Image (tube, rainbow, N blue to C red):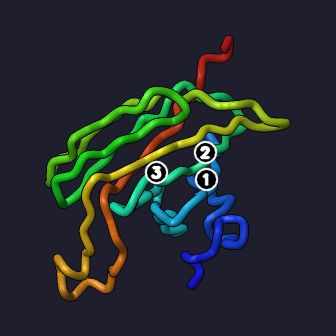
Amino acid sequence: MANDLPVALDVSRAHVLYSQEPVVLLYFLDTHSYIPDSTAIEPKVVWVSGSGRSDIIVRTERPLDHLKMTAESPIRTVFTVSAGGPASTVPIVPGQVASIDVPASGVRGLKSYAYLLSVRSSEAFTEHLRVPTSNDMRNLGVMIRFTAVLAPPDR
């Protein structure tokens, strides 16, 4: 099964285009989060599994100030997120969308900037068990969307 492969061998989990403006590429380093549907509109949805912390490299051509993120879930859970800086922990209540500004601190590469996005959901559910007509058998925790906010030009 493709999800059992390390990210280096699973091309579908590396170099995922998340947004066009600014250009944001995602590299999923583990199987504790799910790549966005390639047909989704921006910002795309990333589901975080309830089975452990997930690390995702966020790569951009220009430096970031922060990620403007929303998180939601149909279950009560606690969401923890960081992007190279201090972690934010947010209780998620079913039916409510939590908004989080996640400070970004990364490293400059040859032609881009990289940020380590770490996400975790304390609880999980399987949609098929909640809605028997669903074919979704994934271990889901929190659904996130984010927009990359560029740093001011002088930074």
**Vertical comparison of 114 with 44: above or below:** above
Between the C-alphas of marks 2 and 1, the distance is 5 Å
Q: Which residue is mark 2?
A: 58
Q: Considering the numbered disc 3 on the image, is that residue within a helix, a strand or a loop? A: loop
Is tag 2's residue or tag 1's residue first in the polypeptide sequence? Answer: 1
| Residue at numbered disc 3 | 43
Classify the position of the N terminus by image quarter: bottom right
Residue 19 on image: x %, y %: 57, 50
- Please provide percent x and percent y for residue 141: 30, 60
Please tell me whether mark 2 or mark 3 is closer to you in this view.
2
Nearest the viewer among 64 and 88 is 88
User: What residue do we see at 63% from left, 75% from top?
Assistant: 5
Mark 2 touching mark 3, by CB under 8 A?
no
The local secondary structure at tag 1 comes to strand
**Mark 1 highlights which residue?**
26
Q: Is there CB contact under 8 Å for labels 2 and 1?
A: yes
Does residue 133 appear left or right of residue 13 in this picture?
left
Q: CA distance from mark 2 to mark 3?
A: 14 Å
Q: Are marks 3 and 1 in contact (CB under 8 Å)?
A: no
- Image quarter of the C terminus: top right
